[in-house]
Image (cartoon, rainbow, N blue to C red):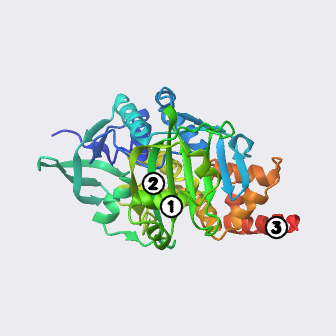
Amino acid sequence: MSEKLDVVIIGAGPSGAAAAAFLRKKGRSVEVIEKTHFPRFSIGESLLAQSVAILEDAGLMPAVEAGGFQYKDGAAFQYKDDYKDIYFPDKSAEGPGTTIQVMRSKFDKILADGAAEMGAKVVYGEEVIAFESDDDGVKLTVRNEDGAVRTIEARFCLDGSGFGRTLSKLLDIEVPSNFPPRQGVFCQVKDNIDDPTFDRNKILVSIHPEHRHVWYWLIPLADGISSMGVVGSPEIIKAAGETEQERLDTLVGATTRMKEVLKNKQPYREPGTIHGYACSVKSLYGPSYALLGNAAEFLDPVFSSGVTIALKSAQLATGLIDRQLNGETVDWQKDFSDELYVGIDTFRACVSTWYDESLQRIIFNKPAEANDIVRHLTSVLAGYAWDRSNPIVQQPDRYLKTVDRYLTTMQV
């Protein structure tokens, strides 16, 4: 009888691929089950600087650097004629200060291929249809595209299935998000941007001139491609037009800077819609399994936190799995769930204060020089949401509200 596999991973996206790489570095046997075939399209193209540090730790960064992706050093914000930017190297936390913006189809394949080159078995075109677990391990029933079914037994399972949320659905542990429902419409364009003042090294986040809870992204990618989209309440999105293209055109037409820099754009990828993306679960872990990234928790795309949370969850979980499989007693609540939620809760506060407009005011009222307030905010927006020396991470909501009041008073 063959020896039981150490770890089976559901999903070959960033969290699954990074987890496989971390585990292979520790000498663990790993099989990754992916429902789709790579390369495949995904949104979420703008990465944060903390992601670079985690990818370096996983041993995947050399392959990523060879991919020729767009350099990114921060984020720019536009409201009517008011423009402010955040320069990631001005952060207070240690670690990389720059990152990349990626075509996810290419980026995700590089990560999955990198994990495979490190010795992980990656199988495409298979879907997990049943799952059992106890303290001794897990049993997965998977079905391929021809309908053939097989069973995989492993000592542990990680769910990196992203928006597919495989285990949360099979185990009925999903819970509704407390965020209001929002909807995004997006596409990719050949941008043909000829404005010499436009900064391709930053994501441009624009705010609707009348509805400040409606915001836009413009993410320059390599080879003259850009990702663009708008997020708002379903009512406002639907009222903007009958088709996805009409909705995009109408809403982008209300902007100033974004409309102008994209005046020469040409279609590259058909528009799409994403809705119902915010989610949470009853628990991030159970007997011999844990949930990674978007399979566990997704907040909102406004601060590009998704890939960073996914990679951080892989880094935390794989260290605990290695210790547990070595016979050590590990505390999944304290060292995985509680630790991951330090960053999730920090990003959650940023999302909440963005939509109640207090974080918007902070960004547009912030001093031009990189003082402590700017450096702390920059660190979080660069992805360093687990840095406990940062007062925002210590008390996210309270600190941001206090800073908003202080800066607003200084403007009077």
In the displayed structure image, the side of residue 375 where residue 262 appears, left or right:
left
Category of crowding for the residue at label 1, using alpha-carbon neighbours closer than 10 angstroms: few (below 14), some (14–19), many (at least 20) = some
Circle 3 residue: 408
Identity of the residue drawn at 39% across and 45% down:
269
| Badge 3 amino acid | Thr
Q: State whether residue 347 is above or below residue 111.
A: below
> Between disc 1 and disc 3, whose residue precedes?
1
Identity of the residue drawn at 53% across and 42% down:
264
Identify the secondary structure beneath mark 2.
Answer: strand
Q: Position of residue 202 (x, y in %)?
A: 63, 43
Q: Nearer the viewer, mark 2 or mark 3?
A: 2
Between 362 and 199, the one lying in front of the other is 199
Determine which quarter of the picture holds residue 322: top left
In the displayed structure image, the side of residue 195 where residue 295 appears, left or right:
left
Q: Position of residue 172 (x, y in %)?
A: 32, 69
Q: State whether residue 64 is above or below residue 128.
A: above
Between 266 and 96, the one lying in front of the other is 266
Label placed on residue 250: 1
| Badge 2 amino acid | Phe
In the displayed structure image, the side of residue 53 where residue 9 appears, left or right:
left
